[in-house]
Amino acid sequence: MDIWHIRGGNCLEGTAQIQGSKNACLPILAAAVIAPLRCELLRVPKLSDVDAALKILRCLGCTAGRRDETVYIDSTTLSACAIPHELMAEMRSSVIFMGALLARCGEAWLSLPGGCRLGKRPIDLHLKALRALGAEIEEEGGELHCRAGKLCGAVIELRFPSVGATENAMLAACGAKGETIIRNAAREPEIMALQDFLRALGAELEGAGTAEIRIRGFHPRGCVQFKIPADRIAAATLACAAAGCGGDVSLQGLESQQISTLLHFLNTAGCDIMAQHHALRIRSEGRLQPVGTVVTAPYPGFPTDAQPLLMAAMLRASGRTLIRETIFEQRFRHVPELCRLGANIQVDGDTAEILGVERLSGTAMQATDLRGGAAMILAALAADGESIVFDEGHVRRGYEDIDRTLENLGASIFLEHEGEDNGFNTAVQSSARR
Ligand code: UD1
């Protein structure tokens, strides 16, 4: 158990470097098995989800290790095409190994993936795409057995621009004979990152970032070096922290235009934003203006991952903000926890109404999922007094040293791994534990 101790009320000031992207890195780690190759990945964030992907690679017979921010993978030694249930359950992105293993081995044994509980998270679009390429997939009791004597290029029309299904289809298509066209493909920056990596591996493909991706063929190169792009949601998190706490924060190493929808709302809320290509400066008085209605949507719309983060920033706004969540059916599980701080939020179906309050007061909360847990930390930073966030490891699945990053910006935050001694008020902790 991780226990985040936060003393709220400090303004944030200073500069932070943005970590490598979790959501770009995980599909790229899966892609490393599509051909026998050695690769060196730079700027790989230290996250428990990345550790889980490295465990999967080792379990498949690959060599996978890390030195500082660089991960080395040798997939020439791959000797298995089955992933045990306990590794599949560690994260959602384990499902992307399905397309990669089919491309490499023509077979994959795995089970339904884990990940944040955000309501139903079906994989029917993944399976439909792989079947269109010629895979036979049997599902029984959560176990999946995929086989393809030969994968053949096809036209894949996605009912919804699912990020995961697009990634699985791209990887499997690299092992197919003939051209594949993915229509209504997801346009997220992580799809562009995967395209860039696959091109470095020798794949011939184009269109990532648009709704149509074409994969024409694959002539593997043996050795690749690739730098993981910056994490747009980690950048969004720090931008929302600065907005909600007040202060003057510069973020470096990000692609600001990837979070332009969020920056638009923070600007409407009264933040002063100076965005350059690889840097962003955000200045805020702390008490924001309401921003009207925010609706989550596939990229380039407002990201579902940033929804809890913007909500945290708006809790003390001087009026009403509405947030409509259209991607995941249960992505307001953080709301009852934020209300424990004194926030005024009403949820009706897919919409949350936030009525800004003047003050939030420190309390104990329980992290519900990765971004929900991060939102609790942000809200606690803007609250009076001490807060505690109990967390079964959700936040560290996606953020590298977020406590140190925030501390360097002037926040008072301390991460305790349960069982270790710390200087904080353990009386608050024991009375608050539920
Ligand atoms: C989603 C986000 C992505 C984010 C990631 C991590 C969207 C569109 N996707 O990607 O930006 O980085 O979470 O938090 O915002 N669906 C199906 N059948 C499927 C697959 C998905 O019905 O086979 C539905 C899901 O139930 C959901 C929607 O499609 O309503 C989005 O799913 P998808 O993009 O696949 O989710 P992730 O890949 O997890």
Image (tube, rainbow, N blue to C red):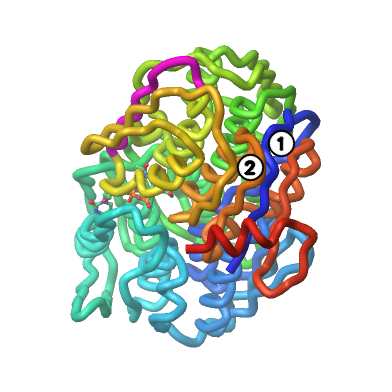
What secondary structure is marked by label 2? Answer: loop
- Specify the quadrant of the image occupied by residue 97: bottom left
- Circles 1 and 2, Cβ within 8 Å, touching? The answer is yes
Q: Which mark is residue 230?
A: 2
- Ligand 1 closer than 8 Å to label 2 CB: no
Counting residues from the start of the chain, the first of labels 1 and 2 encountered is: 2
Q: Nearer the viewer, residue 309 or 83?
A: 309
What secondary structure is marked by label 1? Answer: loop
- Ligand 1 closer than 8 Å to label 1 CB: no
Query: Could you tell me the amino acid type at mark 1?
Result: Gly
Residue 97: in magenta span = no
Query: Could you tell me the amino acid type at mark 2?
Result: Ala
Residue 325: in magenta span = yes
Q: Quadrant of the N terminus?
A: bottom right
Q: Please determine whether, in this image, residue 65 is positioned above or below residue 335.
A: below
- Specify the quadrant of the image occupied by residue 283: top right
Q: In the image, is 172 to the left or to the right of 349?
A: right
Residue 279 horizontal/vertical position (percent): 71, 27
Count of labels shown? 2
Tell me which residue sits at (33%, 56%) in the image: 169
Q: Is residue 149 visible?
A: no
How many residues crowd around disc 1 within 10 Å: few (fewer than 14), some, or many (20 or more)?
some
Q: Please determine whether, in this image, residue 65 is positioned above or below residue 345.
A: below
Tell me which residue sits at (53%, 45%) in the image: 376
Q: Nearer the viewer, residue 54 or 329?
A: 329
Residue 207 horizontal/vertical position (percent): 41, 38
Residue 324 horizontal/vertical position (percent): 30, 31
Query: Gap in Å between the C-alphas at discs 1 and 2?
Result: 7 Å
Q: Which residue is mark 1?
A: 253
Question: Which stretch did the figure color magenta?
Answer: 317-326
